Each structure stands twice: as C-alpha cells, then as structure tokens.
Amino acid sequence: MCGIVGYVGHDNAGPILINGLKRLEYRGYDSAGIAVWQTDDDIRVTREIGKVKNLAANVSPEEEDAGTGISHTRWATHGGVTELNAHPHRSWDKQIYLAHNGVIENYETLKSMLLSEGVTFYSETDSEVLANLIAFNLASQRGKVTTKSVQKAIRASLNLVEGTYGLAIMCASVPGTLFGARKGSPLILGVGKHEMMLASDASAIRARTSEVVYLDDNQLVTLTDERFTITTSDDSEVKPEISTLHWRDDEADLAGYEHYMLKEIYEQPSAVENAFRGRLDIEEGTSKFGGLNLTRQQIRQIDRILIVACGTAWHSGLVGEYLIEKYARIPVEVEYASEFRYRNTPMEKNTLVIVISQSGETIDTLEAQREARRKGYHVIGIINNVGSTIARENDGGIFQHSGPEIGVASTKAFTSQLTILSMLALYLGRTRDLSYTDGCEMLDAFKSLPGLVSQTLELAPAIEKIAKKFAHYDDFLFLGRLELFPVALEGALKLKEISYIHAEGYPSAEMKHGPIALISEKCPSLVLAPDDETLRKNLSSIQEVRARKGKVIVVTDSNEVPASLADELVIIPKAHPCIRPILMTIPLQLISYYIAVELGRDVDKPRNLAKSVTVE
C-alpha cells in the first residue's frame, strides 16, 4: 500500500519526486524518503517520519539539482514507524538503493542466509533484505558493474523471493539509470520527453506525461532519460503498449474544498451521471454495457452470481445482491475477496463472478479474480481505474468513470458502484423476466438521480449541526433493513474510518437479538427508515431504542415519521427503490465527515489506513 515514484531525466528530480509523493500520500503516510544522485556522483538519502511535508522541508538544495532519483511514502508492514525503517533502503555496500511496495514473505530465511555471509542490516523491514540480496548477487558476479549485470542480479534475487513487490531501484555504479520490477503490486512507467518515470499510481505521473505503460507481473524494466526496455522472467524483451491517461491532472486537486473527502462527496452528482452516461437504452427500456463480453443467450443461462470485493466495495456488492435478486431474480452471494481464494467455495457451472474494486489493484480482489478465472468462470469487474491490473486481467468489465478518488474513505466511488449495480440489475432483469414498463421506470429513476443527489447535498448545513451535537459520543449503532442494511454497514465503516468512533451496522430487526444491550443515553442509533413496507417495523425499532433512553437520528424519505420520535430527523427526496440506497448513503457520509472535522481528525489521511490495499 506504499507509494513509489522514480524519475530519470533532464529536470531536477527532487521537486518532481516530492510532488509525486504528495499525489501518492493516500497510499501511506507513516514515513517518506528520497534518494537522488548528486553532481559529485554520490547518492544522497533523506528520510523522515510522518507525512511527505516533513520530508519536503528537509530536502536540501543539492538534491533539487539531481536528475535521477527514487522516493517512497510508507504504510508500515514489517517494522515500526522509524527513520531506519523508512525507504529508500540502501544495501550494506552502498551499491543498491531500493523503494519497495509489497511484502516479502520469506524475508527471514533470506535474511538468515545473508547474515551468514557477513551482510549487515540496519532496519527491521523485509524490504532491506531485498536491497541486500540484489547487492549480494551483484557482488557475486565480480567484474565491472554494468546495466546487464544489475539486471541479472535483480532477476536472480527476485527468483528467490516469495511474496509481492513493486520496486524502483538505483545502482551506484550505473548512473542515470533506473530499474523497476513488479509482482502483485502495481507499477507504472511514464514516458515523457527526455524523461521517464516509475510510479505506483498514475496520479504521480500525470503532471509530467499522459503516456504510460502498465507493467505486468514478473516484468523488469530498465529506463534512462531517452529509452526503456522491458523483459520477462526468461529475459525475453517485450514490445510495450503505450496507453494514454484520460483524466486531467487538476481533477486530483482540492479545488477550494477543505478536504478531498468533502470535494468527492460533492462530486457525486457528476459521478453517478458518468456511471450511466451512454448506458441507457430508452427504446428497449433497459441499460446496456459494451464490455461484458457475454451474449444474451449466455446471460440467460446464468444460474448464480458471485460478487467478490473488500471493504466499501463489499458493501456495494451487498446492495447489489438485493437489487439483482429483486429485479433479475438471479441468486447472488457476496464473498470477502480475502476469504474466497482460501475457501473451496461450491460454485454452479453457470456462475458469473463480479469483482468490485475502485483502484483495480486491491490484492485480495485481484487474487480472487485469478482464482475464479483459473477455475474457468467468466469474471467481470466494476472498476474505476481503466489501466489497473484487475481491469486488464478480467474477461469483461464496467468502468465507473468517477475520476480520481483521493480521500482514503471512499464516497463517490461507492455511490458510483451502486449506480452501476442497479443498472446491471435492470440489464439482467430485462434480459430475463423484467417488464418493459418496469424497465422504463428504472430508466427514469437513473435520469433523475444527479438532480436528486444534488438536492440531498443541500441538507449538508443541517447535517453539520447534527454532527456537532453527536460528535462526542464513543459508540454508535447504524440500523437498516433489506438493501439499506449494507448502507448501514457502510455508514458505520465511514464513522470508524475517519473519526475513530466505535460504530456497528445491523439489520434493524436484529437489534433486539443482542445489540440492544448496548443501547443507553451514551450510545446513539442512526436508523434508515424508508417509505416502504418496512417503515412500520423500523418505527417499532426506534420505539425500542427510545424506551431505553437511546438517542436516535432518523434518515427517511417518508413524511409519516413523527418528529417527536427522533432526536434528529433528516428527510431526503423520494426516489425509486433502485436508487434509494444511493440517496440514503449521502447523509451518512456527511455526518461522518462533519463529526471527524469537529473532532479535529485528519479526514483524508486517517490513522493506520491507506487507500489502495496492495498487501495481503
């Protein structure tokens, strides 16, 4: 989950690397470091605990004159948050400088071997083992160090490694050259004019170039300011495919908002519109998707759908389960991606697997996709990152087109996923049994969605006042029924992520089967009470909370909820049930955001978290 940026070119590497790290800081912000060539052919390493701004304040003018360098922002796995554990790491003989994203699972075995050979270690990390291993294999070759000998040492070292890695490497004996390699962790090559870059994410490259090469597993790239070569594990050279980034660099700016999370909450009208733009077939009363790579006959033969995801995407999958079963009448199961690959899950022959990942690089989801494809199942992805590994490896997909999401707590990506899943429910339903009339009603709902989201966002000032009243409670319950139960889970997750308040989501009716023991004046409940067949039951649950002196916030689209029944009442616009979960989500996002702000939390960089989870 760490962020890597490397640069080789004619400009000063220091500012370019620092700017790139700032773009990648959502991937980790425990520490940051930079290693750059100096004019005296020395490589200077600067590392600081904490955020990139701490590093930026300590980068010397000499480092700004360098034309080659690597840098890293860390999310700690092996070893505590210390300067010695920060990257880049330097080998004991000062030959290899390395920034690593991933986990070396057999690092203890490799470290023991190197220690027996007299190699010295300074950190607790698995990454330093890799730097020393490459240096050891390089020294074992004897003779003059060349680009070829470094490539050979890297390849020999990686053949011994068990685990995942995205690597940016420099060798002190080969100036003006960077080396990169990947397996399981993302790494992108940026191709500029008289310069090349390596990065974990396109956001770090976009300010310099829009031309990128997405590296595949087991590929090794060697780059100078004018050229690059890519080789596979058998040293065969690969003809690269250069892709063009289609989002603007200014899309990753704050644009006047205090936090990225707030900006992305307010981008949801356009995010949901981008999700359905060009995908509504008015004449046929259905939605359409061009990238599923399934015929209508194959779709009619689907007996079961398995949705695989992690975190917020798992919650969107749970909403999708309700919607697809309701409108398409296909049985759906939702699995944690981290569990799926280790379970022998019984699957029907005609099972469609759907993976959901905003980044398209979530390692658990990627490995689950690979497992499903290995077993012969058709896998489609709901992905925001077009060039991601998951997007490149699946059998078909639906891109969200939400634009970059920088805030660690997902907002617009979640509602975009809900929009796509609802449209997918329509598409599958119309291919099977759903009527034309029902399809047209759902299409009308999608067309109204951006406006309804904007109306819901107008409630923000009132929600901010509610949040300030409830910001100093230590526990929350979020309650919902049917497709709003996953929304309750998502609301609880958002509050936990950015405010550090303990919160749990439950089906409303399940409260009396245990969680009701938590109800007191010190544990508020937020209840989602839609105007549907569950309204009376939800009102009864609210009465049960009130009878035990629990405070209640009610989010509803009904005018039948007595104001006296709730401590705070948030009324959202009425909408078709297929889009109601999207509108119900927005007040929960705003409540979590404003509570976190009231408590002085770092909203965009909450403690212990990172945006793209690329380690198991």
Image (cartoon, rainbow, N blue to C red):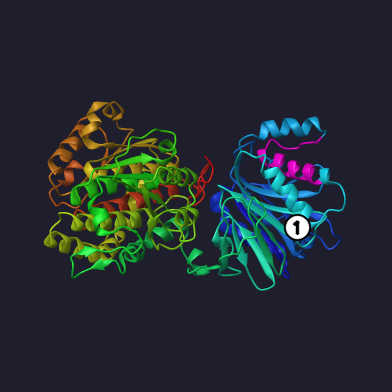
The kind of secondary structure element at disc 1 is: strand
Residue under the image location 29 percent in, 65 percent down: 450
Relative to 394, 347 lies left or right? left
Q: Position of residue 383 (x, y in %)?
A: 41, 56
Residue under the image location 67 percent in, 62 percent down: 229
Mark 1, residues whose alpha carbon is within 10 Å: few (<14), some, or many (≥20)? many
- The part of the image, by quadrant, that contains residue 6 is bottom right
Q: Position of residue 77 (x, y in %)?
A: 59, 38
Asked if residue 615 is among those painted magenta in the image, a careful observer would answer no
Q: Residue 552: in sight, yes or no?
A: yes
In the image shown, does 375 or 479 lie closer to the viewer? 375
- The part of the image, by quadrant, that contains residue 433 is bottom left
Q: Is residue 422 above or below residue 511?
A: below
Q: Position of residue 121 (x, y in %)?
A: 76, 36
Asked if residue 125 is among those painted magenta in the image, a careful observer would answer yes
Q: Is residue 289 above or below residue 551?
A: below
Counting every numbered tag in the picture gives 1
Residue that label 1 marks: 36
Q: Residue furthest bottom?
A: 193
Relative to 571, 495 lies left or right? right
Q: Position of residue 218 (x, y in %)?
A: 60, 50
Q: Residue 555: in sight, yes or no?
A: no
- The part of the image, by quadrant, that contains residue 206 is bottom right
Q: Amino acid at mark 1?
A: Val
Q: Which residues are magenta?
A: 119-138
Q: Is residue 512 above or below residue 175?
A: above
In the image shown, does 472 or 11 lie closer to the viewer? 11
- Type of secondary structure dominating the magenta stretch: helix
Residue under the image location 78 percent in, 43 percent down: 137
In the image shown, does 589 or 163 lie closer to the viewer? 163
